Amino acid sequence: MTKYCSDLSVSSVERLSSKHVLLKLTQASPFPEMFPGQFVEIRVDHSPTTFLRRPISVNLVDTDKNEMWLLVAAIGDGTRELAELRVGDSVNCVFPLGKGFTAAETLKGKRVLLVGGGVGVAPMLFQGQKIKDAGGTPYFLLGARKAEDLLELDYFKRTGEVYITTEDASAGEKGYVTDHSILKTLDFDFIQTCGPKPMMVSVARYARERGIACEVSLENLMACGIGACLCCVEKTDEGNLCVCTEGPVFNIKKLLW
């Protein structure tokens, strides 16, 4: 797949929480086709402590408005700088990078559960939209520590069926995503997930125990995005693989978890 290095314009900034910002980027020409699970590498221009690009999952591609959405968690110097971008600012991005989830078109007739935690909900919205566009109904299971950490709920509710867990019971059911009652009342054919590693390990264990096909989107440190720096290596049944080029999405059968 062709990679692009382009200066994109910020067309919208939505502050979703005290540390989360939804950036919408655009350019004069139409964006190339991108797939849920892929990511971009953004150059951070005004942070003296940030020397490498920052990998951000593609949250959605709005072809009508020619916008690419990026959900940014401002947790370090680089992402805090990105969270301060304003409409009209320019950002240099390399995209699309990595391999995404199994295409929604091949999942027709299957009941698919999309599990997201924290900023890991970003590719879940994109995949859910693809499933909806293909004529299916995505089931979202979203987890957070507390209600204010739940992101983009309005978008998720417009896309599919939404189920929620919070650790403090401030929204949805109390506990972790694998504690939700939906896992006891509905049968699923496929699970796709992204979020903190402990959450994904638990989801993978649930899937393995029930013989459900499952893919996870890893969040290893991807400093270059092209397999050169080897920062993101993951041990698999084929040996060590670069998450940025061989993933970030992997079938759990390949992972040594």
Image (cartoon, grey):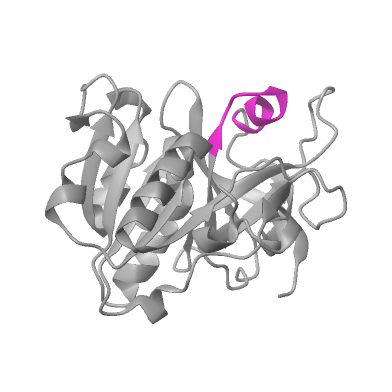
Magenta stretch bounds: 72-83
Picture coordinates of residue 16, whole percent (x, y):
41, 31
Residue 242 falls within the magenta-colored stretch:
no
Relative to 194, is 179 on the left or the right? Answer: left
Q: In this view of the protein, which residue sits in the foreground, 248 or 255?
A: 255
Quarter of the picture containing the N terminus is bottom right
Relative to 238, is 36 on the left or the right? Answer: left
Q: In this view of the protein, which residue sits in the foreground, 20 or 169?
A: 169
Picture coordinates of residue 23, whole percent (x, y):
54, 43
Q: Residue at x 43, y 38 (%)?
A: 199
Q: Residue at x 56, y 64 (%)?
A: 100
Q: Residue 18 is drawn in which quadrant?
A: top left
Picture coordinates of residue 55, whole percent (x, y):
68, 45
Question: Is 161 situated above or below 223?
Answer: below
Q: In this view of the protein, which residue sits in the foreground, 48 or 174?
A: 174
Picture coordinates of residue 67, whole percent (x, y):
53, 58
